[in-house]
Image (cartoon, helix red, strand yellow):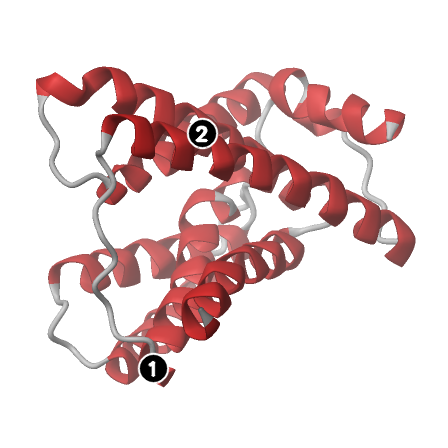
Amino acid sequence: MLKFLSDLKLIFKSPLLIDRDKKSTIIFKYFVYIFILFFINTTISFIIHKVFNTQRPYGGNLNKKTFLKSVIFIPIIEEFVFRAIQKRKKQSIILFISGILSFFLLLYSKKINIYLHIILFLFFLIFWFIYFFKFHKKKINPYTKKQSIYIIYLSSIIFGLMHINTFKTINLQIIFPLILVTLPKVFDGFLLSLLRFKFGLFYSVLFHVLINLIPFMIFQFR
């Protein structure tokens, strides 16, 4: 627990000092600790929405396509966009570019079939992979401490702001509850960043998928 709190402090102040440790017991403990914090944050957001009556009602159909999109595809895209870029490597840049293209495609082309989205996402991934490893020979230097802190804060804040889509409407009258709901989501972004630095991008993606799976299962069996 003390080590987790120490690493949590480092993600805000000196993320490059977080030591990698992929022991299964450590991964499990961090997943449990972060799940508890996510649960607290989600509860806070839920209470705020209830108090101010601002939450948009869920109107989607729970089917295989919804599962594929909400539980698998969107968490992967969000991690590629918000967490991959936190490490300056060719692989990370490839994932970020592929993620951001797929994200905007998903955002502005809602009528496109989810399977087509996945095919296009894989196309983006392969295209940029070939470009960076075949044609882009320039060495990519890692982030400095200052740059690393900046990118983590920026990506976490944007990640939090992306979740204002849970509101019925966005206007100046609800600015106070909007801020109160956004702050826990920003903190969630830092928690996912901790997983990214401590264990790698795969584990932040895995945790994000599991977190999105829980509400889907609740809606499915209620």
Cα distance between the residues tagged 1 and 2: 29 Å
Q: Nearer the viewer, mark 1 or mark 2?
A: 1
Residue nearest the viewer, comparing 27 with 88: 27
Residue 103: x %, y % from top left = 28, 57
Which quadrant would the N terminus be assigned to in this image? top right
Residue 86: x %, y % from top left = 53, 38
Location of residue 104 by image quarter: bottom left
Residue 38: x %, y % from top left = 58, 40
Image height of 100 relative to 15, above or below: below
Q: Earlier in the sequence, mark 1 or mark 2?
A: 1
Q: Which residue is mark 1?
A: 63
Location of residue 160 by image quarter: top left
Image height of 119 relative to 45, above or below: below
Amino acid found under the numbered disc labelled 1: Asn
Residue 202: x %, y % from top left = 63, 59
Image height of 23 relative to 188, above or below: below
Amino acid found under the numbered disc labelled 2: Val
Regarding residue 167, the answer to whether it shows in the image is: yes
